Image (spheres, rainbow, N blue to C red):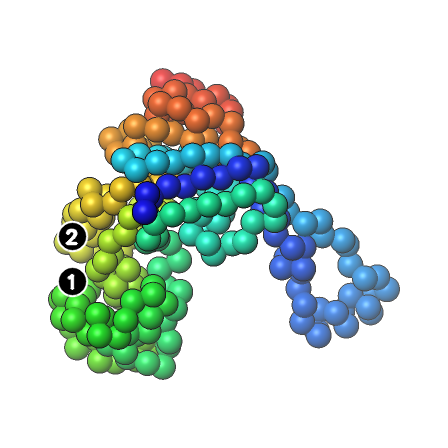
């Protein structure tokens, strides 16, 4: 099977109900004020996005906050369904975003290794075979056998990072730099990310770090209000991003 991402006129909308407060208290408060509240329009998050990415490509995504970069990555990963258009993705996807999703607070870290692995589509037998390596990489000591709800935010991210990066994929999706703890752990984290990048056939990286984008990704795609406004060499993509956002192109 050839690994490939093929998108044609992809549109993605967020339902307005997702942005409304739906508690009974809010509803009663609105009624007491004598109105039903202001209408919230659906959000057109991605607009007629067409893109082809083939094996060997490293693609960097640029855009202001809310431009559509993270939504694009989650759409490619299959987490967000498209409203219209065609999404065709071939290959095993590994994504590094929303690292804390999938944890069971009352279960131990060791138990959550299994749970998170199942969410990634991996077998219990396989997760057991890599458990020791995950525990050593996370380096959270005896807390591995404590419930997740006793962890600090940093410890949760370290364990999630260790699990999510234990196995690579054909298509690697990265959203910003991972803040995973102290300096020593960050060194390990960056080395592991680069190893995953080396092994992946396709990389898509969303970041505001221009230096990282230039060093890793020859191709740049600029998002602006949900639309692709530029697709080409990274130096030109950075210039286009700065021009769209009124930044000096030094």
What residue is drawn where x is 34% and y is 49%?
A: 91
Contact, CB < 8 Å: mark 1 with mark 2?
yes
In this image, 110 relative to 98: left or right? left
In this image, 122 relative to 129: left or right? right
Question: Quadrant of residue 231 in the image?
Answer: top left
Residue placed furthest toward the right? 34
Please state the horizontal and vertical placement of residue 186, each as a whole percent of the image: 20, 51
Please state the horizontal and vertical placement of residue 131, each as a whole percent of the image: 18, 71
What residue is drawn where x is 35% and y is 28%?
A: 219
Toward the viewer: 6 or 20?
Answer: 6
Toward the viewer: 234 or 89?
Answer: 89
Toward the viewer: 219 or 27?
Answer: 219
Residue placed furthest toward the top? 250
Q: Is residue 132 visible?
A: yes
What residue is drawn where x is 36% and y is 18%?
A: 250
Structural crowding at the residue carrying mark 2, measured as other residues with C-alpha within 10 Å and reported as few (<14), some (14–19) or many (≥20) = few
Question: Quadrant of residue 48 in the image?
Answer: top right
Residue receiving disc 2: 188
In this image, 128 relative to 71: left or right? left
Residue receiving disc 1: 137
Please state the horizontal and vertical placement of residue 56, each as a whole percent of the image: 27, 35
Question: Quadrant of residue 108 in the image?
Answer: bottom left
């Amino acid at each position: 099977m050839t690994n490939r991402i093929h998108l044609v006129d992809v549109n993605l909308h967020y339902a307005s109900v997702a942005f409304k407060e739906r508690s009974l208290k809010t509803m009663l408060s609105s009624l007491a004020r004598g109105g039903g509240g202001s209408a919230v329009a659906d959000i057109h998050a991605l607009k007629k996005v067409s893109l082809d990415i083939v094996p060997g490509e490293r693609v960097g995504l640029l855009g202001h906050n809310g431009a559509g970069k993270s939504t694009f990555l989650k759409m490619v990963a299959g987490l967000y369904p498209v409203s219209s258009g065609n999404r065709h993705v071939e290959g095993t996807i590994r994504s590094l975003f929303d690292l804390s999703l999938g944890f069971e607070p009352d279960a131990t870290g060791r138990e959550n290794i299994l749970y998170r692995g199942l969410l990634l589509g991996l077998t219990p037998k396989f997760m057991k075979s890599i458990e020791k390596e995950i525990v050593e990489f996370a380096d959270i000591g005896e807390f591995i056998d404590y419930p997740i709800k006793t962890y600090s935010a940093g410890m949760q991210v370290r364990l999630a990072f260790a699990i999510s990066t234990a196995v690579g994929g054909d298509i690697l999706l990265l959203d910003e730099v991972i803040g995973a703890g102290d300096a020593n752990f960050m060194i390990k984290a960056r080395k592991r990310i680069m190893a995953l990048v080396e092994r992946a056939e396709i990389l898509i990286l969303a970041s505001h770090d221009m230096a990282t984008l230039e060093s890793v990704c020859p191709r740049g795609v600029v998002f602006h209000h949900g639309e692709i406004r530029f697709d080409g060499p990274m130096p030109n993509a950075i210039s286009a991003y700065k021009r769209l956002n009124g930044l000096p192109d030094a």
